[in-house]
Amino acid sequence: MDLSGAPSNRLDPRAKRVWRIYALVVAAFVLLVCVALAVVMVLIDGPPAVWLVPLAATLVVGGLWIGLAVPAMYRRWRWEITDVEVRLQSGLIIVRRTVVPMARIQHVDTSQGPLLRMLDLSEVHVATAAGKHKIPMLADQDAAGIRDRIAALAQVTDDGGL
Amino acid sequence: MMADSDLRRTHPATVAVWTAQALRQFGVALIAVAAFGSLGGGVGGVRSLIVAGVILLIVLVVVGVMWVSWWRYEYGIVGTDLLIVEGLFVRKRRTIPIARVHGVNVRAGAFMRILGLVEVVVQTAGGGSGEPEAKIGAIPLDRAEELRNALLRETRGGAVETPATPDPVGRISDFRGVFGGGEVRGSEVRFEHKVPFGRLVVGVLTSNRVPIIIGVGLAAFGQFYEIIGARLLEQATSRVAATAMPVLVPLILVAALLLVMVAAATGIARDFGFVARRYETRIEIEAGLLSRRQISIPVGRIQAVRIEESWIRRLLGLAAVHVDTAGLEQGGQQGQITSSRAVVPVAKADEVSHLMHGLLPETEVFPQVLGVPAHALRLYLLVPTGLAALLTLAALGPTSWFVYRPALPWMMVAVVLVALVTAGVRTLEWRRAGAGTDEIAVTFRSGALGTKLVRLTRSRIQSLDVRQNPFQRRARLASLRTVSVSGSSRAKYGVAHLAEAEALRIMRWYEEGLARPSTSSDSDARVGGSNRAGGAQAGESASDPGSGGA
């Protein structure tokens, strides 16, 4: 896709840190399983490949994810809010560009989990009659600003009512 | 308190109707209880008495609950509102301004029809965002007519009008034909479409309901046959088996035929006497042989229009028109959410444009469709064909390699065949796929042997996205998808592997439509255009907390 038309804003740079932490948590779980497998294999004198292969795979995939995929995802993620629409671009391998009209937005809210709260980050959720769209990993004040802006714009562009 | 003297209860038979509906839902549990109880043998045993007692108790409790909810349920028209008061301890007052009523559905099951009762469902402007629409239990037909007239008259902004233009169909009436009774002076019927019985039969036989029922039936019969057949094979030496086998085969055929007839009969009973009528702001559909229904489809709620020709109907030159509507309706006895309805269940393909002109002139023009580029074919073919071949290989390969080597060549043949069929279907899909836009709408075309044309008005699309994977990027192709509302859920329509420039053009077309949100330039903005407003205000309009009192 020609990148000229991409939305203009990036996420907060700390997004990369959060995504890496998420990846590490997942990897930790998988490693735990590997350790359990290793213990079982030692006890029953089974082949070491049963735990060595998943361990190696986890390390390789985890390394690639943290080293390459997370920065690529961050570079890809763009958002933009105009007076009439919310434009989003995301995706790692498949690039996805979405247009959500202001007039279709029913409500907007921000949320943050414990990890995001520690880093003062928030997510903005934009809901239409047919589902939600998310702008993740924004600095708290940015997220609040965006939420209020969308709320105000969605009000203004109310298309007349019945 | 408001003028609650104007409120009235529904018909006492409502208790029976609701009980029957509830018991039907509990039916499986009751049968399970009965079956469990009868395991213990003896008919006169204590256990069967207990079981009978439990069942009686359940029924009595259900009747009691239904009686209380009937007794504490009142409705009526107070001033310019429809007021519904319900609840035993917590009295819930629901005020629906008549001006916000979009449509009124009337329906009756066979049991209700014997008693001359109907059920009324009131659709409001706000409906569709969570809360089911107001349902007024079993009431006598004449009450329902009064209510319907009162509710629909106001939506047209005035007293009973005498239309200035002559009625094109020759009737000035707000019809309620299937329910019998006289005609009621109401609004003008602009267009009427009846499906003749013969056409209906053909339509039902070519619908996808029949093959599904046959498939399920044959599968069930197959299970049965396997059990019986296995038993028979055990005693294969006996002459009994030898004579029983030839009997079983015709039996299967008879069963299949029977299933076709049952499927056809239920389909025909469902759509018997199908009539679609267009009024100024809504389409009304009446149909049904035993249980009858009269359904309003407010035009403003239509999100998408689909013209579909399945391959078998294509051969016969037939087509159907469906509409997706926003709104949540607790349908019939099953309580399912209906969102997509046929406004023309079956018609000759060359009549469709005429019928669309009559029923839905707002959406009769489908934008010209541009196909996907020639070089998109390889994207249509490559991954699905490879995947199908691989899956077949994975499914059959190990067995033929480890268990029965001689089957190996046949396995390869099967893989090739699957790959060829997939490739053929995908080639047809590639030829059919396309998209097009005009000033107000987008059309997507899809299908392989059949065809599906979907038309979405720009102002009804909730969001639109363009996506591109690395293969598509190299080939300068992209997939386009729109998200709209269907019932209470989302409906996605789109086209895969469109030329990148065309996908981005349609995206820009969509964005341009947003640049002037307040001007009502879209031709159907009069009836449409306010989906969001309606949805957002659902909470305030449907249940007015301010009027709560008792």
Image (cartoon, coloured by chain):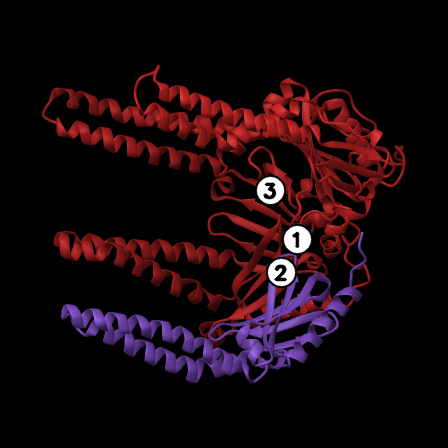
Chain colours: A purple, B red
Mark linked to residue A30: none
Residue in view at x 50 percent, y 52 percent: B447
Determine the secondary structure under disc 3.
loop
The x and y percentages for residue B289 are: 59, 24
- In this view of the protein, which residue sits in the foreground, A62 or A115? A115
The extreme left residue here reads B237
Mark linked to residue B366: 1
Chain that bears disc 2: B
Give the CA distance from mark 3 to mark 1: 25 Å
Q: Amino acid at mark 2?
A: Gly
The x and y percentages for residue B237 are: 9, 25
Q: Say which label, 3 or 1, has the lower sequence index.
A: 3
Determine the secondary structure under disc 2.
strand
Mark linked to residue B436: 2
Q: Residues within 10 Å of mark 2 (few under 14, many from 20)?
A: some
Q: Amino acid at mark 1?
A: Phe
Asked whether the viewer can see residue B192, the reply is: yes
User: In the image, is residue B71 above or below residue A94?
Assistant: above
Residue in view at x 15 percent, y 30 percent: B233
Mark linked to residue B338: 3
Chain that bears disc 3: B
User: In the image, is residue B474 above or below residue B204?
Assistant: below
